Amino acid sequence: MTDAATIQALTRRAVALRRHIVMPASTYYAHLGGAMSCADVMAALFFHFLRLDGRRPDHFLMSKGHAVTALHACMVELGKIDASELPLSGQSGSRLAGHPTKKAPGVEFATGSLGHALSVGVGIALGEQLSKSDARTVVLLGDGELQEGTVWEAALSAPRFGLERLIAIVDYNRFQAAGAVDDVMPMEPLADKWRAFRWNVHEIDGHDMAAIVAALERVPAPHGPTAIIAHTVKGKGVPGIEGTGRAHYTMLSEDEVTRTLAALEVMA
Amino acid sequence: MSGYFAAMSSAEVLAELAEHNPNVVLVSQDFGPVGSFTGRFPDRHFDVGISEQNLIGVAAGLAHAGKLPFVLGMAPFVSMRGFEQIRDDCAYNRNNVKFIAPFAGLEAGPWGATHHAQEDIALLRTIPGMTILSPADPNESLRAVRAAAIIEGPVYIRLGFLTPLDGYDTELRVGEAVTMREGKDVTIIATGGCVGAALMAHEALKAGGVSARVLNMHTLKPMDRAAVERAARETGRIVTVEEHSIIGGLGGAVAEIMAELGTGRLRRVGVRDVFCTEVEPYPELLRIHGIDAAGVEGAVRALLQ
């Protein structure tokens, strides 16, 4: 059980991540919604769960690569990217692109095309298991991304190899590019799908820091991999936009940025 | 020898490599035990079942975790269904994955066009950092596996039906074509099992007074540009031979080099932009599509006219 002070610190960290994501949001179009929705999960991963240093560090793959600004925000908080670089993301000469690339600090695996990283995660976890290492491998997936068949090929194979240190986290924010996931191609019953594929499944409120941390702390679970289905709100923390289809790919007005930053103050 | 058996033979080379390098692992798709490798290294052979995309993603992950994965998968399925995983997860992310791909070309014969790999060279040679090897006979396929293990980066070893070439034991130097026969009137550039057909055509042409150089282009990428340019300058005429579409493969690559050079005339022997739908045994399928010694000889004669 993680103490209340740690949970509180992680919650503040998530607010800091959201601030980094939102501040440049009036300068370019970005996949704002999916970055804001996973900010709490990212805070729990990068500032509590993942062992980033040492001989066999943990692995993090952002399969939903379009949420890259959340990853860049973590690197700002870790001191690997200067906050002043964020507004230049995607601009001429920047080392920060619209999806995770190896030019950007802290990106372990370049992604973008959806449905790739869970298979890669299976391979990494398999390699670590073979090396008798206790490194964990975390793959962050989008809910719309689960419409890619490759995700389920990977999901089928992970329990076959007993990968107890592999974690798939689904950022279930309910929206994809064309609209609501439930309208485009419903994924329900989602938890049952993962259970049927023989994963240990935890369904949580993806904005409840204590719940996120508790779910992560149940890894390694005996016999196989863990799927954490994090119910989230697309664009979480952006007034008037959170929970709407517009949140997926958008540019904010300067006024919207100001109002969001004010709202984040309250959250902190 | 079927590409499948060539692949199985290569498992012996893999086992030998695995003895010395604990990072060597084998990842396959529904292949069962692979040669002696599986028996000797049961915990280093992973079969992911029938899922090419996952197969390649998993291999990329293994490489990322410091392993040296060899992927064993059917050429048509690995190269086409798994293309994006080869591109993104292996090449773009710079993961050191080796592919051993039997059933390249038309070897699957009467199984039908779904099982023919006549696009794999064209597809894979567009990927930056990719190496493509296409050995000419069973022994060269073993040399290709050894060469692949040393290369840093993804390597695709294309294995079609291979007949032993008598007395051929030239070292495989990646990116360096082997001059199998000297000649001055025309150069036949062949790859894979087609090298055998080219050598037969060479003999037939010689009997008719035509001196044909024969090159074994065992490395399709990076291609031996200098050898192609020499052939164009010295013999003026080039015939390419491959069990692959004439679009984008060996013939396509040679055409690109010749066009930039601005010298020489070319004919391409290969699958002429059709699916090979005839229900025929493999040798007959090659004959129908003109990818045999007679087809090569005919192409040379047409070019000499």
Image (cartoon, coloured by chain):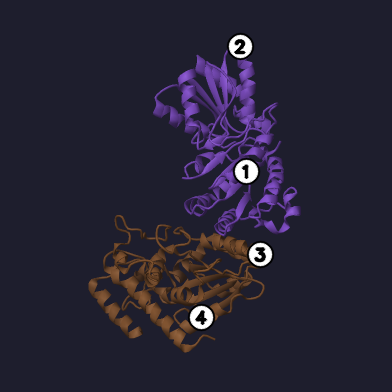
**Residue depth check, mark 2 versus mark 4: number of the one nearer the observer:** 4
Q: Chain of mark 4?
A: A
Q: Which label sits on residue B115?
A: 1
The tint of chain A in the picture is brown
Q: Chain of mark 2?
A: B
**Residue depth check, mark 4 versus mark 1: number of the one nearer the observer:** 4
Q: Amino acid at mark 1?
A: His
- Label 1 sits on a secondary structure element that is helix
Circle 2 crowding by C-alpha within 10 Å: few under 14, some 14–19, many from 20: few
Residue sitting nearer the eye, A103 or A156:
A103
Q: Amino acid at mark 4?
A: Val
- Label 2 sits on a secondary structure element that is loop
Sequence order check, earlier mark of 2 and 1: 1
The reply to whether the C-beta atoms of the residues labelled 4 and 1 are less than 8 Å apart is no
The residue at which mark 2 appears reads as: B208
What whole-number distance in Å separates the C-alpha atoms at marks 2 and 1? 38 Å
Same chain for the residues under marks 2 and 4 in the image: no
Residue B41: % across, % down: 72, 55
What whole-number distance in Å separates the C-alpha atoms at marks 1 and 3? 29 Å
The reply to whether the C-beta atoms of the residues labelled 2 and 4 are less than 8 Å apart is no
Which residue is depicted at the point 67% across and 72% down? A223
Q: Which label sits on residue A213?
A: 4
Sequence order check, earlier mark of 3 and 4: 3
The reply to whether the C-beta atoms of the residues labelled 1 and 3 are less than 8 Å apart is no
The tint of chain B in the picture is purple
The reply to whether the C-beta atoms of the residues labelled 2 and 3 are less than 8 Å apart is no
Residue sitting nearer the eye, B273 or A168:
A168
In the depicted structure, whether residue A19 falls above or below residue A108? below
The residue at which mark 3 appears reads as: A161
Residue B44: % across, % down: 68, 57
Residue A176: % across, % down: 42, 67
Circle 1 crowding by C-alpha within 10 Å: few under 14, some 14–19, many from 20: some
